[in-house]
Amino acid sequence: MSKDFYLEILHVDKNSKARYGILHTPHGDCEVPMFMPVGTLATVKTMTPEEIKSCGAGVILANTYHLHLRPGEDIVAKAGGVQKFMNYNGPMLTDSGGFQVFSLASKRNIKEEGATFKSHLNGDKIFFSPETVIEIEEKIGADIIMSFDECIPYPASYDYVKNSTLRTLRWAKRGKEAHKREDQALFGIVQGGDYQDLRKMCAEELVKMDFDGYSIGGTSIGEPKEVCFRMIDYAIEYLPFDKPRYLMGVGSLDYILEGIGKGIDMMDCVLPTRIARHGTCMTHEGRVNIRKECYKEDFSSLDKECDCYTCKNYTKAYLRHLYVSDEALGAHLLSIHNIRFLISIVEGARNAIKEDRFNEYKEEVLRKYGDKRGF
């Protein structure tokens, strides 16, 4: 692991497990907990890297599977790595592509060697193994990279989950042995489904391998909320205090705040930009569907409590006009707002942790949004 990558925990809330700290990386330092925007193809959809930074983002994500298909990791490497390729002045993370392999690819064949599948773009045959995924991620060059794992479907039988989790552990060991770049942090991914003993076993075995950080995987794949929260509890108590904890694929307020309260440091989701492209906005007054007729002559800002570029400069009436006219600027401006909104909520959580009032902050936010908190 790079000497430039480490987590510095500065304060733990006295009434919860929420923690505040600084994540040091080769491309800069970030406060945790953090929400990480998703830039699957080395771009956060409709937004420039400069706009992402202006929203307060620290780490952003790119995806190994998608960049392998387009434009190819060799091109990214020739550009000098993913940050230079996309002109992002900050730290980045690449998912291993495991979720995409098991959710997008057709005709998967999973064996001990790895996974053989067909591209969702053109049907070409592709083989991913723990070693090939690490090779791709090293060429892409993000500060943080993920181990290759099997994303277990929900629900699944105990025997299936156990066999899959044991394979994921063997893949994690192989990937760690293949990892050569000292300027990249490699995370292990805790699987185990909704089975407490398997989550515990997986977490403990990964910790023995001494990864640079740990992700909790197999969540946000359609399971009920209470199951997701159990999965976090089953894993997190066995993860080391002084290394980053990453909850994969959560982006609604209730999940984000619940994760932070349990000691999660990092979260990501495509939610804010995806719903923006459909005209939906997260605001301090709840969900706003900008397509509605009631906004046609509404010349107020989208969110009077928001400090983003969109809210400072544009009205609901104009944003509605852009959306109903199918102008690309509409999705662009709504994406800026939604990203900034989620990041600002997590900024508030960080301040609350430092003041030992995280539980009150969480209750206040969720009470304010009522039934709209999940967006």
Image: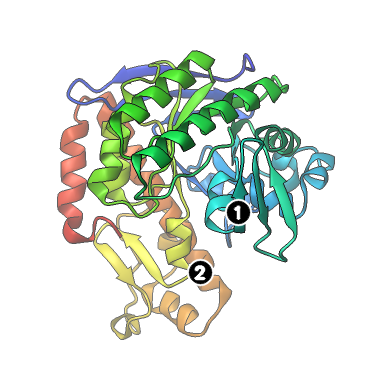
Q: Residue at x 38, y 52 (%)?
A: 341
Tell me the kind of residue under disc 1: Arg
Give SS at disc 2: helix
Q: Quadrant of residue 104?
A: bottom right
Q: CA distance from mark 2 to mark 1?
A: 34 Å
Q: Quadrant of residue 345?
A: top left
Front residue of 107/94: it is: 107
The residue carrying pointer 2 sits among few (fewer than 14), some (14 to 19) or many (20 or more) residues within 10 Å by Cα, namely many
The reply to whether residue 21 is in sight is no
- Identify whether 105 is placed above or below 249: below
Residue at mark 1: 108
Residue at mark 2: 331
Q: Quadrant of the N terminus?
A: top right
Front residue of 97/12: it is: 97
Image coordinates of residue 356 in percent, x first then y, are 21, 25
Q: Residue 63 vs residue 278: left or right?
A: right
The first of marks 2 and 1 along the sequence is 1
Q: Quadrant of the C terminus?
A: bottom left
Answer yes or no: do the residues labelled 2 and 1 have beta carbons within 8 Å? Answer: no
- Identify whether 284 is placed above or below 97: below
- Numbered mark located on residue 66 in the image: none
Q: Residue 30 vs residue 288: left or right?
A: right
Give SS at disc 1: strand
* For discs 2 and 1, the disc positioned in front in the rendered view: 1
Q: Residue 168 vs residue 373: left or right?
A: right
Q: Colour mode?
A: rainbow
The reply to whether residue 79 is in sight is yes
Image coordinates of residue 362 in percent, x first then y, are 21, 40
